[in-house]
């Protein structure tokens, strides 16, 4: 598959904010000779290009129809490919691929790593201040009442917005033999998610950690933690 040269944005991998555990999984996946690395969400093409420049992995472009899906699965049998998706989360990416690909077994065999990202405004480091979380704020983030979070009222450095730049929030998981079996057997979204995030961080836990570290506001963490599983159809 030819490398897509239309992607022009570039961002160093260490500036993406990818968690260490997911970064280690990516290093392992990038060392493989064949397979498919799937990246979904806003800014996925930017992230894919960063990985392409770091590891030399071919870019498969955006997968949004059956032709593109089957093309990247076939390409993954010949070499390592990164493809981008518009799915809202990592499990949704598997569901979309399974719906589009002609050969479910070939898809399961090809997948190496699935990454999804969401983007939230970062907190201004000049005016952020610790606050205690109570009531719905604590409950929505799964925190004990009184947990320390951060808020930024705004200052001259951030133009009164309380924000500073954009922060990527990641979830992702390696596709192991058990996950491959779930994929080609037609497991639904909750079952896929249960296995995927046994030991890997999902959006909720990743966003909660960033909120506790003062990187994003609690409201942004709640928004990034939204769970689409209940609203998503899970075609078998």
Image (cartoon, rainbow, N blue to C red):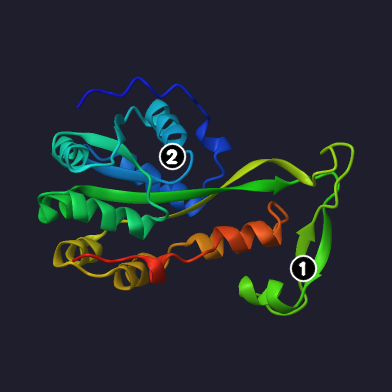
Give the residue at mark 2: 44
Residue 53 percent across, percent down from the top left: 41, 26
Quarter containing the N terminus: top left
In this rendering, position of residue 103 left or right of residue 63? left
Dot 2 alpha-carbon crowd within 10 angstroms: few under 14, some 14 to 19, many 20 or more: many
Residue extending furthest right? 156
Q: Nearer the viewer, residue 29 or 44?
A: 44
Q: SS of the residue at dot 2? A: helix
Mark positioned earlier in the residue sequence (1 or 2): 2
Q: Position of residue 11 (x, y in %)?
A: 52, 29
Q: Residue at x 54, y 39 (%)?
A: 16
Coordinates of residue 69 in the picture (x, y in percent): 21, 42
Residue 173 appearing in the image? no
Which of 101/150 is in front?
101
To which residue does mark 1 refer? 148
The secondary element bearing badge 1 is classed as strand
Q: Where 133 falls versus 124 (above or below)?
A: below
């Amino acid at each position: 598959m030819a490398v897509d040269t239309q992607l022009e944005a570039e961002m160093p991998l260490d500036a993406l904010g990818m968690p260490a555990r997911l970064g280690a999984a990516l290093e392992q996946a990038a060392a493989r000779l064949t397979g498919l690395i799937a990246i979904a969400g806003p800014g996925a093409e930017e992230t894919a290009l960063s990985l392409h420049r770091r590891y030399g992995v071919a870019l498969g472009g955006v997968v949004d129809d059956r032709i593109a899906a089957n093309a990247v699965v076939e390409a993954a049998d010949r070499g390592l490919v990164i493809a981008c998706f518009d799915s809202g989360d990592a499990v949704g990416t598997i569901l979309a691929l399974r719906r589009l690909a002609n050969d479910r077994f070939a898809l399961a065999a090809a997948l190496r790593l699935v990454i999804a990202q969401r983007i939230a405004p970062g907190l201004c480091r000049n005016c952020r201040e610790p606050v205690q979380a109570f009531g719905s704020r604590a409950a929505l983030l799964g925190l004990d009442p009184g947990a320390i979070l951060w808020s930024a009222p705004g200052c001259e450095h951030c133009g009164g917005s309380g924000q500073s730049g954009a922060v990527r929030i990641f979830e992702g998981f390696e596709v192991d033999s058990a996950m491959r079996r779930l994929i080609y057997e037609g497991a639904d979204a909750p079952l896929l998610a249960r296995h995927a995030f046994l030991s890997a961080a999902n959006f909720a836990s990743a966003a909660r950690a960033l909120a506790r570290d003062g990187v994003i506001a609690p409201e942004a963490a709640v928004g990034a933690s939204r769970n689409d599983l209940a609203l998503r159809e899970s075609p078998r």
